[in-house]
Every structure is written in structure tokens, then in C-alpha cells.
Amino acid sequence: AVSEKMAAANALLIEINDAIMEGNAEAVTFNSGMIDTNSKLLEAGILAEKATPEANAARIQSNSDRMAAVLERATANAAKVAEIMEKAKANRAHILENSEKIYARREEMMENHAKIAKNALLVAARIHGNRIAFLPTAWLSKQLLG
């Protein structure tokens, strides 16, 4: 069950990575286009015939409309980001809690390991007869377990 969950989680991570790479490719394409446009504007300079009051008013209106759309998107994204941050904080708390449990479980396992080793020594003593049964457990542990 754990392996299947890990495989499913890895598939989701691969899907997420692909989406990030696609978004990055779109950003690179968009930015390349904007850099090209800006470079052309800088090379050509401002053409007096295109700098009319009407053209400027149209450009101002177009920029205002685009700014409104960007602001609307940013506002919607801000709410999503806040929601995601709350989930991330909850996930972090859960991870820290699990970390503490893992260390406690590891300690329990080490205690069990010591008990198993002790029992193994007792079994070995019985198998070999009482020849080594009289030896102290600590000495036996050192001899058999190194």
C-alpha cells in the first residue's frame, strides 16, 4: 500500500513539474516577445506621426484596460495564495509532528533491538548448554555482537 501511494505521489509530482516547465516556457516566450518589442521601440525611437493626441488617448485607454485585467487577476490570485499558504502551514505542522513521532518510533525500535539481542544471547546460551550461561550478559553482548 505504501509503495502504491509513493508511486501515485511521484506521478503527481511529475505532473506538477511538467506544469511548471510549461508555465516557464510560456513566460520565456512572452518575455522574449516583449524584449523584442521594446528593443524595436528603443531603436526606432518615438515616431512623431504616431504620437498624436488620439493615438496617445487610445494607448492610455488600452493600458488602463490591461491594468484593470491584471489587477483583477492579481486580486484573485492573492486569495488563492492566502489559501495555499494556510494549507502549507498546516502541512508543515503535520510534518513536524510526524518528525517527532518518527524519532520516538526509532527509539522504540532501538529498544526492541536491544531486547532482541539480549534474548538472542539467552537462546545462544541455552543452545550451547550452560557452558556460557554463567557469563554476564554485557560480556556476552560484546563477544557476540562486537
Image (cartoon, rainbow, N blue to C red):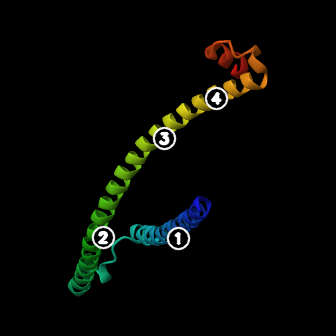
Residue for badge 2: 77
Residue furthest to the right in view is: 128
The C terminus is located in which quarter?
Answer: top right
Residue for badge 4: 119
The total of numbered circles placed on residues is 4
Whichever of callouts 4 and 1 sits on the residue coming sooner in the sequence is: 1
Circle 3 Cα neighbour tier, 10 Å, few/some/many (<14 / 14–19 / ≥20): few
Which label is found at residue 22?
1
In 3D space, how far apart are the residues under numbered discs 3 and 1 (Cα atoms)? 41 Å
Q: Position of residue 137 (x, y in %)?
A: 63, 17
Which label is found at residue 105?
3
Q: What residue sits 25% from the left and 77% below the top?
A: 72
Q: Secondary structure at mark 3?
A: helix
Whichever of callouts 2 and 4 sits on the residue coming sooner in the sequence is: 2
Q: Secondary structure at mark 2?
A: helix
Where residue 61 sits, quadrant-wise, is bottom left
Considering depth in this image, is 142 or 127 the residue closer to the camera? 127
Whichever of callouts 2 and 3 sits on the residue coming sooner in the sequence is: 2
Camera-near label (2 vs 3) is: 3
Considering depth in this image, is 57 or 18 the residue closer to the camera? 18
Q: What residue sits 68% from the left and 24% below the top?
A: 121
Whichever of callouts 3 and 1 sits on the residue coming sooner in the sequence is: 1
In 3D space, how far apart are the residues under numbered discs 2 and 4 (Cα atoms)? 61 Å
Q: Tell me which amino acid carries mark 4.
A: Asn
Q: Secondary structure at mark 4?
A: helix
Camera-near label (4 vs 1) is: 4
In 3D space, how far apart are the residues under numbered discs 4 and 3 (Cα atoms)? 21 Å
Considering depth in this image, is 119 or 133 the residue closer to the camera? 133
Q: Is residue 137 left or right of residue 22?
A: right
Q: What residue sits 62% from the left and 15% below the top?
A: 138
Q: Tell me which amino acid carries mark 1.
A: Glu
